[in-house]
Image: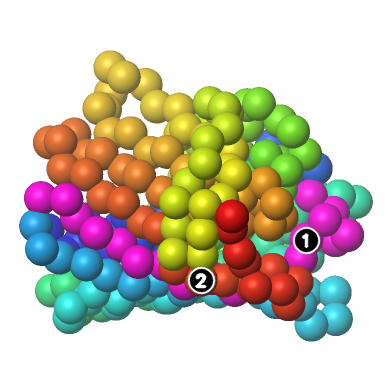
Amino acid sequence: MRRALLFALALIASPLIASTATAADLKPFSASYTADWKQLPMSGTAERSLSKEGDTWTLNFKAAMMIASLTESSTIKVDKDVLQPQTYHFERGGLGKTKKVDLTFDWAAKQVTGTDRNDTIKLPLNRGVVDKSTYQLALQQDVAAGKKSMSYQVVDGNEIETYDFRVLGTEKVDTKAGQIDAVKVERVRDPTQTKRTTVLWFAKDWNYLLVRLQQVETDGKEYNIMLQDGTVDGKAVKGS
């Protein structure tokens, strides 16, 4: 049960055939979130940030609940308007079954190499392929660009999977930072394969920062993740 909530937390950290994101579009941010599991008195917290040094962006994510913890980090460059991950690190602990992933994206050799648990990863690297953290940044930027449907190629284990999303409309979201106008986005899945649903809300007035996430599992259990506070380009996020 703790693993399920931590997985939901990871969705806010944790795809891209071609992203419209440019270095000018990206803005540094930091945000903290609270997470609740409706069926049980169990909660968690998460922090997510984007910073820049030189021509490299770093996307960091940390989540914790009770005895469980998760960290995720990507370094990213922008090449001709396309996000290109350079390294990816993921580590989960405290759940009885630890997991560690390290990937290196060699764009000159067009190859992704690394390890997932103890398995060796070696995959062909084509333009637009991203890791399981960077795709969320690409999604944020594509929503900001006004796209209504998005499709991403993501390194997932020893395969490259396609992640699909679509915009559902706009809604007001009540957060601890105030009421925020947001774009509502849904992860598109094959209903014959799974009943899991994932919906995300991105703040229109705050460079499309993620402010809410709702996930319903196949067994009906529901998780909600909500913005607690944050900054975008040095300015504190405030709603109405």
Image quadrant in which the C terminus is located: bottom right
Q: Please tell me the numbered disc located at residue 229.
A: 2
* Nearest to viewer (mark 2 / mark 1): 2
The 10 Å Cα crowd at callout 2, few under 14, some 14 to 19, many 20 or more, is: some
Residue farthest to the top, as pictured: 192
Model colouring = rainbow
Using a 10 Å C-alpha cutoff, classify the residue at mark 1 as few (fewer than 14 neighbours), some (14 to 19) or many (20 or more): some
Q: Is residue 24 magenta?
A: yes
- Residue 32 position (above or below residue 134): below
User: Of helix, strand and loop, which one carries label 2?
Assistant: strand
How far from the left and from the top, in percent, is residue 225? 36, 56
Q: Which residue is mark 1?
A: 26
Q: Residue at x 31, y 19 (%)?
A: 191
Q: Which mark is residue 64?
A: none
- What is the secondary structure assignment of the residue under circle 1? loop
Span shown in magenta: 21-39
Q: Amino acid at mark 2?
A: Asp
Say how many tags the image has. Answer: 2
Dot 2 or dot 1: first in sequence order is 1
Whole-number angstrom distance, CA of label 2 to CA of label 1 = 19 Å
Image coords of residue 231 (percent x, y): 64, 72
Spot occupied by residue 172 in the image (x, y as percentages of width and height): 52, 41
Residue at image location 25% in from the left, 27% down from the top: 195
Q: Residue at x 30, y 76 (%)?
A: 64
* Residue 233 vertical position relative to residue 154 in the rendered view, above or below: below
Q: Amino acid at mark 1?
A: Leu
Q: Residue at x 12, y 36 (%)?
A: 219
Q: Give the vertical position of 108 relative to 201 (above or below).
A: below
Residue 109 visible (yes or no):
no
Whether residue 173 is visible here, answered yes or no, is yes
Q: Is residue 194 left or right of residue 116?
A: left
Percent coordinates x, y for residue 60 in the rendering: 55, 74
